[in-house]
Amino acid sequence: MKVTKDDVVKIAHLARLELKETQVGEMQDSINKVLDWMEALNAVDTTGVAPLVHMTSALNHLREDVALDGLDRSKALALGPDANEKYFKVPQVIE
């Protein structure tokens, strides 16, 4: 299947892309190369090949979700550049 210039213009319209006339030809060539590559992949015999879920055999190693004691408020505020008794002080960003 080959993509025509009209197809590229229609696809660009659906994707809300503004293509110049010179870009339409480049995009047509690019899409056709991808489709040729997909046809080559479809020609490969994959009978008996299991679907790939992960690229490696490594598994996710998850840890238990255990609540731990957090940082004390006074210690956390001491880590910041400027704070009062309850909050970090930051420069005003809204006028």
Image (cartoon, helix red, strand yellow):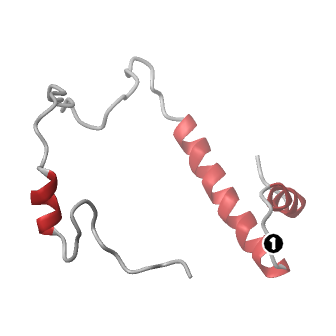
Q: Is residue 18 left or right of residue 86?
A: right
Total marks drawn? 1
Where 37 falls versus 12 (above or below)? above
Q: Quadrant of residue 52?
A: top left
Tell me the element at label 1: loop
Where 4 falls versus 26 (above or below)? above
Q: Extreme right residue here? A: 6
Q: In the rendering, at what x and y percent does residue 4 appear?
A: 84, 59
Q: In the rendering, at what x and y percent does residue 76 appear?
A: 15, 59
Q: In the rendering, at what x and y percent does residue 38 appear?
A: 59, 45
Name which residue lies at 63% across and 51% down.
36
Q: Quadrant of residue 56?
A: top left
Residue density around tag 1, few if under 14, some if 14–19, many if 20 or more, within 10 Å: few
Along the viewing direction, whichever of 61 and 46 lies nearer the viewer? 61
Along the viewing direction, whichever of 60 and 78 lies nearer the viewer? 78
Q: Amino acid at mark 1?
A: Glu
Along the viewing direction, whichever of 61 and 28 lies nearer the viewer? 61
Where 5 falls versus 21 (above or below)? above
Q: Quadrant of residue 15?
A: bottom right
Name which residue lies at 87% across and 57% down.
10
Along the viewing direction, whichever of 44 and 56 lies nearer the viewer? 56
Q: Which residue position is annotated with label 1?
A: 18
Q: Is residue 15 left or right of residue 85?
A: right
Q: Is residue 29 left or right of residue 95?
A: right
Name which residue lies at 75% across and 64% down.
28
In the rendered view of the protein, which quadrant contains the C terminus? Answer: bottom right
Q: Extreme top residue here? A: 48
